Image: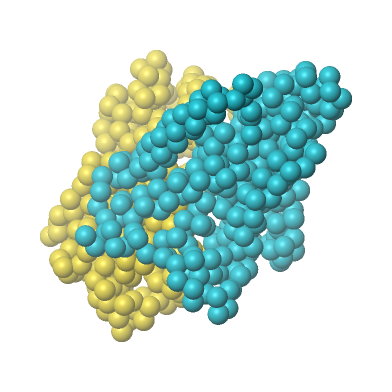
Amino acid sequence: MNALEQILTAGTLFVILMKVAPLLLAAIGGAFTQQGNILNIGLEGMMLIGAFTAISVGSAFDSALVGVVAAVLAGLALSLVYAAGTLWLKADFIVVGIGVNLLAAGLSVFLLQVLYGNPGVTPPSANITLPRISLGPLADVPVLGTALNNQTALVWLALLSVPLASLVLYRTRYGVHLRAVGEDADAAAAAGIRVTRVKAQSILISGVLCGAAGAQLAMATLGSFTADMTSGRGFIAVAALTFGLARPVRTMVAAFIFGAADAVADQLGIAGFNSNLALMTPYVITILALVVAGIQFRRIRGARASATPTPQVA
Amino acid sequence: MKKQRMMGGLAAAVVVALSLTACGGGDDAGSGGSASGGGSDTPAVANVINGPLGDQGFFDDAARGMAEIEKAGSKIQNIQADANNPAQWKSNLESVSGGDWDLVITGTSQMVDILTETAPQYPDQDYVLYDSVVEAPNVASIVYKQNEGSYLAGVLAAQATTNTEAFPLSSGSKKVGLVGGMDIPIINDFVEGYRKGVETVDPTIEVLVSYVGDFTDSNKGFDQATAMYEQGADVVFQVAGGAGIGVLKAAEESNKYAIGVDSNQNGLHPGHVLASMLKNIGVSLESAVEDYKAGELAFGETTEYGLSNDGVSLTFEDNGDTVPQEIQDQIKDYAQKVIDGEIQVPTAL
């Protein structure tokens, strides 16, 4: 009925893109570490600290650009902590990841209290939003024009990060080294690849992308930071990249499925569906879609493996 | 990991600080713990908070009440905690239950299980629990009729969507919305009151309701409110804590109206936040302590704070005169009708 019409508008695509952008940036970042065989649980914390820094620094300098740069640096700094803990101190990846998340949650609330005297939310005086990019005459292109017009630069960056990541992972020396390290670290070391350095670089890349994801999350529409505002998006990103097998395009598809389901769920809730079911919808749809994708992938890989004597990992 | 150690240290520091103040404070505390209802002129009052201050709502308002109690001469202490650490809340509650404080205040439904366990262990300690009920002979429970305050918010929202002259941003769509934090009884009590308020003005007005799923995801609050405005809603009432910050922002972005909650949020987006519904926690705590001084605080019983005793209210302060005086007067009339029992507001509790 009416509800379906409301859901399937070009405006919904605009909303989906906005929801997907931070997820996608974080997931692509996590895909890099995953290619190096590190399951990066710390995406959530890196995103959160990026969101906080974007608002606090951006508003202090009254510049969205400064905010984004600061967010990226903050994500980078936290990823350094993660890299130091896991690679040099040899702690468990998951444990350090949880530590990074707790650190980000505690630190952001602590700094909110110190800087603004309020650990819940940044005050109206510290408000900064990203400029929107107008497409001009191209905005009239049906569907895509509406969806892409007036999005932030970080949405474009998120979309661009997918082909860029593919390029880096599959067409550069670094990408080959990283994947070799992820495949078999000992063999890679024997071949003369500096394993720790390659892994560290992948972690730093994830920090940079998560910082940008946080900036998009806080500055795209709200212009303010609220405590724990990532609300699990980092873990959704981990799910997306896991089911996407850390391949950029598949990861993007997974992120989009979730974003679309999330947008639909918002409408379902308003249309009067049971609220708990509505809130569950994105997760259920994501899992279903990814299970189907996983089965298909396995079939393809199985066929390929039986066709060639040595299985290739693309 | 790191944080937990930090919080552990903090808890230890709190305990040390407490024992120090208890030692230094002389014997004004400790002796007054009679279960029959106090009577001390300046009772020592501890407020165990199951989260940090700074929520611009609930806990901050309780702390405001505590400050007033301190002004009246009492020794007070607010004990903050981690937002998601029930073990710490419990140890904090136990640490002040040993008889050093005449009255121990705590609140919210999250503390119910903990207090149910702790109160019988310290039968000589007097407790006040706000916003929930624990049935024990040494606990005085305070609940708020948020449905009554929410009723007024509903009346206001209905006026705004029908009266496009007084509210120029309205489209006259006869649609209003509510974004709640979670689908839980307390939030649904707001929903019930809101629906009733809207219905009183015009039963043909449609009420859209959605839930964020938590109280932190401000982006989701923004998205849900924006979806409501796109479907034609003229006013959205937020009952979603931190996530509600996104709802208020969405009102500005969509150039429509919103109604705030818990603290005065009218100034956050000038011209767009019509009013804020308040639960006056602080006022209720002050009056509970006054009752305690007079020996009249009813332990083992539940006191309701509604429109009649200032437990809940709708404030128009700082809203940039977006609501004409005559409509404010009308809303006052409705409030009076609720107080007089002429209008019964349904509840979800």
Residue sitting nearer the eye, A18 or B131: A18
User: In the rendering, at what x and y percent does residue B199 appear?
Assistant: 17, 63
Q: Quadrant of residue B255?
A: bottom left
Q: Residue furthest top?
A: B121
> Going 31% across and 41% down the picture, which residue do you hit?
A276
Q: Is residue B323 visible?
A: yes
Residue sitting nearer the eye, A187 or A223: A187
Q: What is the count of numbered marks?
A: 0
> Going 30% across and 41% down the picture, which residue do you hit?
A277
Residue sitting nearer the eye, B107 or B302: B107
Q: Is residue A109 visible?
A: no
User: In the rendering, at what x and y percent does residue A215 appear?
Assistant: 64, 54
> Going 42% across and 43% down the picture, which residue do you hit?
B214
> Chain A is shown in which shade?
cyan
Position of the C terminus of chain B, as image quadrant, is: top left
* B2 shown above or below A277: above
User: In the rendering, at what x and y percent does residue B23 appear?
Assistant: 62, 23
* B33 shown above or below B200: above
The chain letter corresponding to yellow is B
> Going 40% across and 30% down the picture, which residue do you hit?
B111
User: In the rendering, at what x and y percent does residue A122 appear?
Assistant: 60, 55
* B12 shown above or below B210: above
In the rendered structure, the answer to whether residue A6 lies left or right of residue A139 reads left
